[in-house]
Every structure is written in C-alpha cells, then in structure tokens.
Amino acid sequence: MFKSKRFGMFIHWGLYSVGGLHEQEMWRFFVEGEKYEQYMKVFNPTEYNPKEWVKLAKECGVDYITFTTKHHDGFCMWDTEYTDYKITNTPYGKDVLKMLAEACEEEGIALSLYYSVPDWHNPHYPNTTGHHEVKTAAETPEANEPLYIEYVKNQLRELLTGYGKIQSFFWDIPPKTRDKSLNELIRSLQPGILINNRGYDEGDFSTPERMSADGASFDGLTEACDSIGKESWGYRKNEDYHSNLYLTSSIDRYMAMGANYVLNVGPDSKGKIPEVSKEIFTQVGAWYKNVKEALHAKPVKYEWASKKGILTTKNENTLYLHFPQSPDATGFYISEIETLPKTAIVLNDGTPLSVSMDLMPSCFNGNRESMVKVCHISGIPVNRLSSQAIVIKLEFENLDTAIINLQGNEGKRIL
C-alpha cells in the first residue's frame, strides 16, 4: 500500500447527506437523534452508480478508495445483521458497499474501509462526555462497553469477509479503552491489511487530518487526509470548496515527505458526487498524474532546499524540487549545485527551463573574493501555473557529485 498505492479517494457518504449540513449534524447542530433518524425513511439514492465513482477515481490516478461504512451517527452502509439502522432498510434497499466493492474489483481499484468508534445510535456505546459524543453516561443507562465491543467485532467479521480483499482499515476517534483483540481480529480476517492509529491500539500508520506538514520525511507509515469541502466531509449544501492550489500544495507536501494521501468527496442523498467536487477532483487528478513520478520518488533532505522552502525527492540521478507554495519569481538560484543538470523541466506541463552558471546580483556581499557563479534556473511559468503546486525535474549525469554540502565550507559558495 505505502509503496505502490499512494493516492486515494475518501468517500464520506451516509444518512447525513439527506440533511446536507454536515456528517456530524447531530453533534454540531444539536439535532435530536429521533429527528435525525427520520432521514432513514427518505434516503433513496436512486442515482447511485458506483461505476461512475470508480471511473472518476481511475481517471484521476487514484489507487484506492476509502469508504465510510459507519460514521458517528451509527448508520450502516451495508446489509449488516446486527442492527436495523442500515441502508437496506431505507427506500433504496440495496447494499451500496457491495456494489462499490464489485465496481472497484472490476477496475482494479483497491478498497479500504472506514469505521467510526463512536456510535450515536447504539445504546451500548459508552458515551462519556468525550470527544465526538452526543450523550453522557447518565443519559444512556444501557451503556455497556463489552457489549458494544462485541457488536463491533460482529460487524468487523461481516465487513472483512463479505466484500473481497480490503487494503486498509480506517478507525475514527480513538477510544479511551485499549483492546488489541479488535485489530488482531481484523488481521486474522484480512492477512496483510494495514490499520490506522485511531482505533483500540496504535495500529500501523498515522493519519494527520487537515493539517500542514513540517520537516522532510516521516518516521513511520503515514496517510494524510483532507476534503475538497472546507466545512464538511459529507455532502453540504452551499459548501465552501478548497482551491486547487490549497489541495495540490497539501498533497505535494505530504507525498514528497513519503506519506500517502487520501482526498475526500461527499456524494449527495441521490448518490451523485456534486459537479463542483467532480471538477475539482478532476483538475487535481490531472496535476497529480503529471507530477506523479516526483511524488513517488524517495524523499531526500538538503539543508539549502529546506531554507528556501523547497522539498526534494530523488530517483537515481534525477532530483525533483517541490514548491508547495508557488515560487515568488520565474527563476531562482541554487549555489550548492556545482554541475549543471542535463535537462530541467516543469513537470506540471513539460515546460523546458533554462539553466546556467551566472553571477547573481542578490549574491553580492561586497567581497570580490567570495563572488562565484551559481546555478541559475529560470523560465518558470509561475503565473500560468498559479493554481497548482509546481514541481521541477532536474536530470544529472551524477547527482551525488553535482551537489555540495555547505556545512563547514561556507566560504566556497554564497547562500
């Protein structure tokens, strides 16, 4: 997963799409459960076509889809035997997860499953005034954590035996209770599966959400996630959408540091991905496919690059310069490059760049003895590409000898 399958599509879809407010409508808008649960009577996604979702994902270079089987509201998007609060008891009446799993298998897209630990419907879930919980323990006299965990295990058995191969499992909202038996069950049902760190133990990989990343690489396996919608993950009427620059910059930063990235869309109550979401995902996907080789290359750290706000990856003698924030000019210099690259292009659109060893005015420090020529890269179409993170590809005869390390040798080159 973290070697070949790197870019994913997150899909937050459930009963909350009927209200169109937020996937946490009950919690964030103080909606009573009895009122919210009436959505079940009208949830009828007659326009749901998982093949369209998978086709969009594939066209955008997506390797896997992560689907929300049960969010905090407790509504189940598959035909579970352990609650009546499920998609097959709506007017639609079909197992949407099964349909999606079949579509993914047909197109060679891997499937991952999301499952919420908090459950605002199951009476046994021990709501104890923690995060993302809508009731107190005193208000839920039936609360019984061992019974709830047994309920979860029963549903895990369904999810991990009835829907083909599952690539990874995404728990949400870490509980106070630690219980390794749940992840042990998951691994016994799906050998080789990877599990995130939001469940009943530490799992296999971390999941930074809607966050910026610092540094050059991660210590362990990481899957970052964000949504096209700024305000919500599920469908929201009158949503505010992130810009292409924001999304491509986030993806570029995380993936250049070695993380996977999963970008979310929220289908509406009819089962359609909103056109604006589809358009944004398509544009981001086009960018991703153009720069994919750089995102899948090995993260490498150079102090000179970090000081300039540049992330770097490499593949043998090819160096990729990532600009999560667009360059402030059409060119820049790197004093640490002693040998010019054979070729230099902007991966985004293939624009060839000019490279030369020049004396740069901004290197002037009043000392004639220290003035030297530096590698000057110019011709970057910063205005034409202002809506996306820019990635530059430099090919060298020998990358290791082309770049020097200035530490302890500051007099040789001007920073």
Image (tube, rainbow, N blue to C red):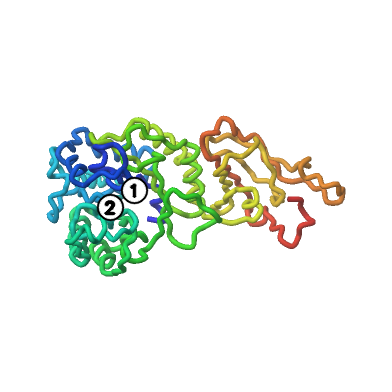
Indicate the quadrant where residue 264 lies: top left
Say left or right for 347 vs 123.
Answer: right
Tag 1 residue:
64
Q: Which quarter shows the N terminus?
A: bottom left
CA–CA distance between discs 1 and 2?
32 Å
Residue 411 visible in the picture = yes
Label 1 close to label 2 by CB (< 8 Å): no
Q: What residue is at 21 percent from the left and 47 percent from the top?
A: 33
Name the residue that disc number 2 marks: 134
Please, what is the three-letter code of the amino acid marked with disc 2? Val
User: In the shown orientation, is residue 47 left or right of residue 394?
Assistant: left
Lateral position of residue 364 relative to residue 308, left or right: right
Residue density around tag 2, few if under 14, some if 14–19, many if 20 or more, within 10 Å: many
Amino acid found under the numbered disc labelled 1: Tyr
In percent of width and height, residue 137 lies at 24, 61
Mark nearer the viewer, 1 or 2: 2
In this view, the residue in front, 306 or 270, is 270
Q: SS class of the residue under badge 1?
A: strand
